[in-house]
Amino acid sequence: MTADQSKLEQQLAKLHQQYMERLKEDIPVLASEVGALVTLPAQSDWRAVILPLKHKFHTLAGSAGTFGLPQLGKLAKNLELQLKDWMAQESAPDLAAINSFMSIFQQVQYAHQSGHQVMNLTSARLDLLNDQKAIIYVLEDDEETAHHLTLTLATFGYQVQSFKRIAELDLALKTKLPDALILDISLPDEEQTGLEYIAGFQKTLVEALPVLVLTSHNSFEHHLQAVRIGARGYFVKPVNTTSLEARLQRLLAVRRREAFRVLIVDDDQLLAEHYALVLQGAGLRAEILLDPSQIYEGLNRFRPDVVLLDVLMPGCSGPELAQLIRLQDEWLSVPIIYLSSETDGERQLAALVKGGDDFLTKPITDTALIVAVFARAQRARQLADMMTKDSLTGLLQHARVKERLSHELQRSERTGEPLSVVMLDIDHFKKVNDNYGHLIGDQVISSLANLLKQQLRKTDIIGRYGGEEFLLILPDCNQQQAFGLVEQLRQSFASLPFSFDYQNFHCTFSAGISQAKGADDTEQLIDQADKALYSSKHAGRNQTQFYQQPS
Ligand SMILES: Nc1nc2c(ncn2[C@@H]2O[C@H](COP(=O)(O)OP(=O)(O)OP(=O)(O)O)[C@@H](O)[C@H]2O)c(=O)[nH]1
């Protein structure tokens, strides 16, 4: 068990303890309310007595199983259903029915006192966020290819180690596994080929190491051999390093993916905390909203990939809240999963019709919760990406990046943190197209996009603003810090070698920076960054300038 897991289990155990404490207080209250049921036949508004009690058993049914008291959960569910039946009757239940209800309730008291915890914390830990540089090993004996590759990958921000011989690579692999291996499969003068070596090494691993193959052969047989050793890319020499890097970035994208965000709306704090901890333990980010009236604020601030919604809450039901969420265009597609002890299929369907996407029945095991939420979040993210991202670069489209700027601007006003905006434009890009063709032009655009993705923080927002124009939003970054960052990017980009017809060439970009100050609006900030960019172009290109207030 890792230190993180043991901490999580401690936190879950603490929550369980708190839940048991809460039951110690809640069950006697419930007992006196159940005791008062004997007066029911004499009361004209008997339904008004039953309804709050039904809600309490509903909550108990949902939470008890989650906290390791399945027997208590089942009994509470039976009592809830009994009260539901009574509500549907013409007249108040008679004393015989009430007595039988009370005897079941006695079992509830027993189940609570003798209850012991059954932890069902899953050990399945999905990808945790990792901000470290990816480590890449390269096996290549040709010095020029190795140098070119190492330089390009290092420029993109990878940590690269290059080896000339299989024995050196073998030693390194046995000391520390890299995130990916780039392998020339046809090294001469070795006892075994790179292909044979890696085929043997992969067998010693539980999870195959991602391998990109370099070779001078382009036959079907060689492709097949590569596939058989688990190759995830095949590059014939002379290697196009920018498309190799793009492949590498796609390969490692899952690892760097921003954690899925789950907003949990539940009025039962302990239960919500339990779900949050379980999801956090699986590498997701979870936030709890106890007060449904704060829903819009919560959505805008946290921007969840999935909303987990309790069905029965005081003041506003889950389905009502789902409808409220769907009133806003922006939240039309966020998946809403109801989490409830409601087992009645028709009522589940009725809730789904009102804006929900899925129904999970409490109590739910931790693994089932993680898998259901993860699958929904992943699909939602893929769909959102397809709708909001540019197909060539995978960056946010023009309108979306402006939307994000508006959110970040509000956040910066609220928190007082600085916010910088950068406009980048590739220099003389028309000439790149004219000299080398549109396809190579596209490659230059996507390389710059990859460089930005690779070198900026996860919290930075990158958009393709126009053809060869990019907009960066840098939260918590003043314009001096932004300048340092953009200059570093500018130098990296200028040093990237592109190739066309065995001929290398380089590109540069110009940049303009503006910083949010108090009451700026989105258009104003972009316009200022654009003016600064224009100054950079005017002053000779391949440079970065700040926006200057006109004197
Ligand atoms: N290959 C490719 N070219 C594009 C794309 N989008 C826009 N372009 C081209 O980018 C070029 C941009 O040219 P301009 O804005 O005039 O820039 P420039 O004069 O070459 O350079 P600067 O003055 O330094 O900005 C145009 O020729 C567009 O056709 C694209 O997606 N792919």
Image (cartoon, rainbow, N blue to C red):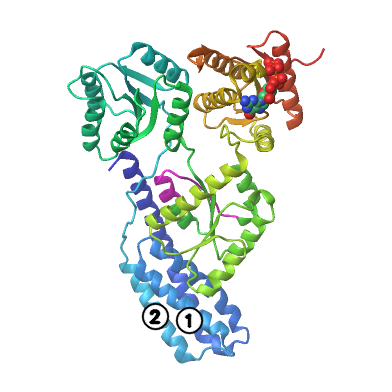
Residue at x-position 38% and y-position 48%: 11
**Depicted 87 relative to depicted 242: above or below:** below
Query: Is residue 190 among the parts visible in the rendering?
Result: yes
Q: Which residues are magenta?
A: 276-291
Q: Is residue 444 left or right of residue 114?
A: right
Q: Is residue 218 left or right of residue 529?
A: left
Of the two numbered discs 2 and 1 in the rendering, the one whose residue sits closer to the viewer: 1
| Front position in the image: 4 or 444 | 444
**Depicted 310 relative to depicted 370: above or below:** below
Residue at x-position 40% and y-position 41%: 127
In the image, residue 281 lies in the stretch drawn in magenta: yes
| Front position in the image: 344 or 182 | 182
Q: Is residue 528 left or right of residue 368?
A: right
Quadrant of the snapshot with the C terminus: top right
Residue 519 is drawn in which quadrant?
A: top right
The x, y position of residue 253, in whole percent, is 45, 35
Quadrant of the snapshot with the N terminus: top left
| Front position in the image: 536 or 200 | 200
Q: Quadrant of ligand 1?
A: top right
Q: Secondary structure at mark 1?
A: helix
Q: Secondary structure at mark 2?
A: helix
The x, y position of residue 370, in whole percent, is 42, 52
State the mark number for residue 104. 2
Distance Cα–Cα, label 2 vs label 1: 11 Å
> What amino acid is labelled 1 in the image?
Gln
State the mark number for residue 531. none
Q: Which residue is mark 1?
A: 82
Residue contact between numbered discs 2 and 1, judged by CB atoms under 8 Å: yes
> What amino acid is labelled 2 in the image?
Ile
The x, y position of residue 217, in whole percent, is 34, 25
